[in-house]
Image: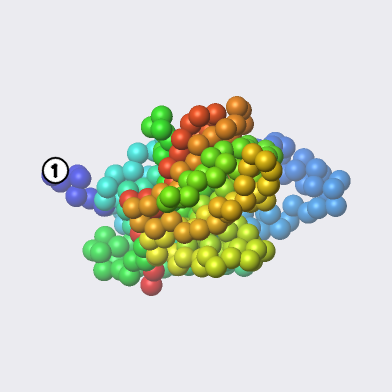
Amino acid sequence: MNGASKVPRVVLVTRHTDYSLLLQRHGTREQARFFLETRNQSIEEAERRHQRFEAALSDVISAIPMKWRRSKVDRADLDRFVFEPEDIVLTLGQDGLVANTAKYLAEQLVIGINPDPESYDGILVPHEPSAAGRLLAAAVSRQVNVQTRTLVEAEVDDGQRLVALNEIFVGHRTHQSARYRLSCGSTEERQSSSGIIVSTGTGATGWARSVHRNRQTDVMLPRPDESRLVFFVREAFPSRATGTNLTDGSIRKKESLEVVSEMNEDGVIFGDGIEDDRIDFRWGMRAQVRVAESRLHLVRD
């Protein structure tokens, strides 16, 4: 190992603020303000959130030691960025930014920084910007508490693979009726539904929780660190050709949920609500959904 490779590298992951996106779309602040005001909205709140983000960004960048290597990557460019095994990853933004980043990692330490506690819950970004320097020093020496969180992966028989922190959706791109064959263990059923959600314990606080609350089921939602997933079939439709008996269940380590597409077009698989980052899932394609081998390693205090 050469000397340069021993120098820690911090990868700072951010995303555009609402205010900066408004300026990109409308060209100037005045044009953006006029656009919003014609719709009884105000630009001031978006501007205040942007200012808080910029202040947090300045604090975080200042906290990175001068001798360390550093890279900054926008969320939109994550699929083209190459992470190094020993990277320390700083995410500066809302909780969803950690989920966006997690699927591109191979167990690097992640420090979630919350730039705006008034706006973001901070479940995955629990740290204030002022804590960045202390946490970076502790992370490079591995003197930190680390919470591991389970990831879910879908692998298609053509070799495509998708990983998510919260959940994976299998169904029709427009959430219309999706047709497929579903297998779990020794049970198999042809179904027509609004799609399938396969959730981790992290995702159990979001989409999966809302589905779980509105149905009678013995399936318990997993903990974030538990090597178990749950699946829910949304609005399964009974007919002569389709059934409604296999509509929820658990998937443990080394088990999988198998889905065979019977959709000629617009069948998709996507994760964490990012529909643009999807696998096209056409008739005859077979997908295995299971607990991912890698896990998110989230730095806690």
Residue at x 23%, y 50% (from the top left corner): 7
Q: Quadrant of residue 117?
A: bottom right
In the figure, is residue 108 to the left or right of 256?
left
Query: Which residue is the extreme one toward the front?
Result: 240
**In the foreground, 73 or 59:** 73
Above or below residue 144? Residue 41 is: above
Q: On the image, which quarter does residue 240 sit in?
A: top right
In the image, what residue occupies the spot 29% across and 44% down? Answer: 84
> Residue lying farthest left?
1
Res 46 seen here: yes
The quarter of the rendered structure image containing the C terminus is: bottom left
Within 10 Å of disc 1 (Cα), the crowding (few <14, some 14-19, many 20+) is few
Q: Is residue 136 above or below residue 293?
A: below
Residue that carries the numbered disc 1 in the rendered image? 2
Q: Residue at x 59, y 53 (%)?
A: 245
Q: Is residue 94 left or right of residue 12?
A: right
Labels in figure, total: 1
Q: Position of residue 49 (x, y in %)?
A: 63, 58
Q: What percent of the width, then of the height, locates residue 265?
A: 61, 28
The x, y position of residue 232, in whole percent, is 57, 55
Q: Please, which colouring scheme is shown? A: rainbow
In percent of the image, x 53 and y 62: which residue is there? 204
Element type where label 1 sits in the image: loop
